[in-house]
Image (cartoon, grey):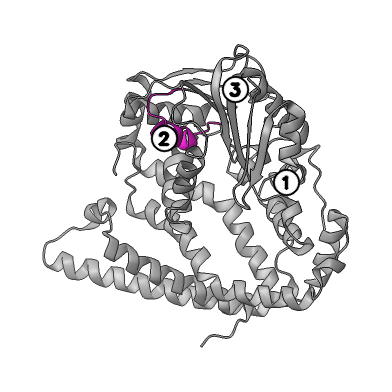
């Protein structure tokens, strides 16, 4: 591995950090598919939602941009986000899920 | 409490920044697996090599078979590369609305800011501390991006109430109830300066930092509150202020960002500018002396991959001894994080 030297502090900006290797390729593919599925579920839901609202004469895109989640929604977003991440990372790392 | 400086993000930027939080929280299972692999790989931390570079090489080999560790490295690397860029993207979405507010907050008020006229030091220039994209000063609104989006939305979410509460508690540890004139070394965007002003509301506060972008945001914060801070783009090691001109000199989590010789110079500078009988309070990261070899390696690896060139030499220093060598008396050092060193200039 690369040993960085503080006498050249800018070397810390973009260190050559080892992460995954060829052994991880299969798990990486599984994680990618898990992520793609989640993205598709959300894309499908968004398209359906916008279509339903448009049929009722409501354009919500500007309101979505400006909307600030209240604590309850933020809490639910946080829980969903962590669950999404855990699904991907657990697939990538091979961590067994309950 | 809300402020006109608060970042009211749009959906894409907000969700992007929040994703960094989700990434940390969602990695709990991964972290547990990586920790189990680490414990199995290092049954006796005391047997690890003494030399830190050799320890890194040893650990790389010991953990080479741990997929959880490799994925954990990936998550850490993604965070390091992306957190600044996502915060920047979030700002770009709202800049049309927020820029006039920020310009007014910087211009209207009692706080002054004097930019540097000379070159930046080699230990600072071009270094992307915390691996923040472009470093502290590349983006013209980096102070706002770092102070209001990264710190208040991202860091605060991961350490709720922690970082700002800590600053106020440390500021209140200075022994006197009132200080007429306070110097904040490494004022940055003004988070500790803010805490000092809250604890000592009558004090005249002066702040120094090498980052002009950070100080510009500190100026906005001060003006918004009506505080007459005097901010200077200068190093803590050579402030240029008169001898014996401050009653309290402090810093909060600055020292690990500067080399050991500059840390010694910073303590000497604090001693010089304090009035006889004046107080010093410096806080920084956990000392390597307070950890076992495995803990030291974890901290050092975090620094290695986290844009912290001077963490190792800083965390290896006995700051109480450095303070005594600078001339301070009644020196105390306490706490794991933050590690707080206090002392007094003899009357």
Report whether mark 2 lies on the same chain as mark 3: yes
How many angstroms separate mark 2 from mark 3 (CA)?
20 Å
Q: Which residue is mark 2?
A: B199
In magenta, the rendered stretch is B185-204
Q: Marks 2 and 1: CB-CB under 8 Å?
A: no
Image coordinates of residue B132 in percent, x first then y, are 58, 44
Residue at coordinates 65% horizontally, 15% vertically from top-left? B118
Residue B187's tag is none
Q: Which residue is mark 1?
A: B315
Depth check, mark 2 against mark 1: the one in front is 2
Residue at coordinates 63% horizontally, 43% vertically from top-left? B284
Residue B219 falls left or right of residue B29: left
Q: Secondary structure at mark 2?
A: helix
Crowdedness near tag 2: few (<14), some (14–19) or many (≥20) residues, C-alpha within 10 Å: many
Pinpoint the chain carrying mark 2.
B
Q: Which residue is mark 3?
A: B277
How many angstroms separate mark 2 from mark 1 (CA)?
28 Å
């Amino acid at each position: 591995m690369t040993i960085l030297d503080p006498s050249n502090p800018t070397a810390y900006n973009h260190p050559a950090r080892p992460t995954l290797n060829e052994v991880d390729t299969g798990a990486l593919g599984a994680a990618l598919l898990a992520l793609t599925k989640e993205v598709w579920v959300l894309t499908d839901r968004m398209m359906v939602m916008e279509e339903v609202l448009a049929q009722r004469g409501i354009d919500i895109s500007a309101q979505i941009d400006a909307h600030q989640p209240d604590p309850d929604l933020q809490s639910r977003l946080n829980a969903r986000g962590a669950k999404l991440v855990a699904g991907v990372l657990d697939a990538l790392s091979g961590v067994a899920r309950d | 409490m809300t402020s006109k400086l608060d970042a009211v993000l749009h959906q894409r930027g907000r969700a992007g920044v929040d994703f960094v939080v989700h990434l940390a929280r969602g990695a709990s299972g991964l972290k547990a697996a990586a920790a189990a692999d680490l414990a199995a790989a290092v049954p006796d931390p005391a047997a690890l090599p003494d030399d830190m570079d050799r320890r890194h090489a040893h650990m790389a080999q010991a953990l080479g078979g741990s997929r959880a560790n490799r994925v954990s490295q990936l998550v850490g690397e993604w965070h390091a590369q992306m957190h600044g860029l996502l915060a920047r993207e979030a700002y770009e979405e709202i800049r049309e609305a927020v820029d006039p507010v920020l310009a007014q907050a910087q211009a209207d008020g009692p706080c002054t800011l004097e930019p540097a006229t000379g070159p930046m030091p080699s230990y600072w220039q071009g270094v992307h501390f915390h691996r923040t994209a472009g470093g502290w000063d590349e983006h013209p609104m980096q102070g706002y991006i770092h102070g209001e989006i990264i710190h208040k939305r991202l860091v605060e979410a991961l350490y709720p109430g922690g970082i700002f509460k800590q600053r106020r508690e440390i500021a209140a540890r200075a022994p006197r109830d009132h200080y007429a004139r306070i110097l904040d070394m490494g004022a940055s965007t003004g988070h500790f300066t803010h805490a000092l002003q809250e604890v000592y509301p009558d004090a005249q506060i002066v702040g120094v930092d090498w980052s002009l972008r950070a100080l510009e945001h500190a100026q906005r914060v001060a003006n918004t509150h009506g505080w007459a801070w005097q901010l200077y783009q200068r190093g803590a090691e050579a402030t240029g202020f008169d001898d014996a001109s401050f009653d309290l000199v402090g810093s909060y989590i600055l020292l690990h960002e500067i080399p050991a010789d500059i840390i010694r110079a910073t303590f000497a500078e604090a001693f010089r500018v304090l009035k006889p009988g004046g107080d010093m309070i410096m806080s920084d990261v956990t000392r390597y002396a307070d950890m076992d070899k495995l803990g030291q390696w974890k901290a050092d690896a975090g620094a290695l991959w986290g844009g912290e060139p001077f963490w190792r030499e800083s965390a290896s220093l006995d700051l109480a001894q450095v303070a005594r060598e600078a001339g301070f008396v009644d020196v105390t050092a306490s706490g794991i994080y933050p590690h707080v060193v206090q002392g007094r200039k003899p009357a």
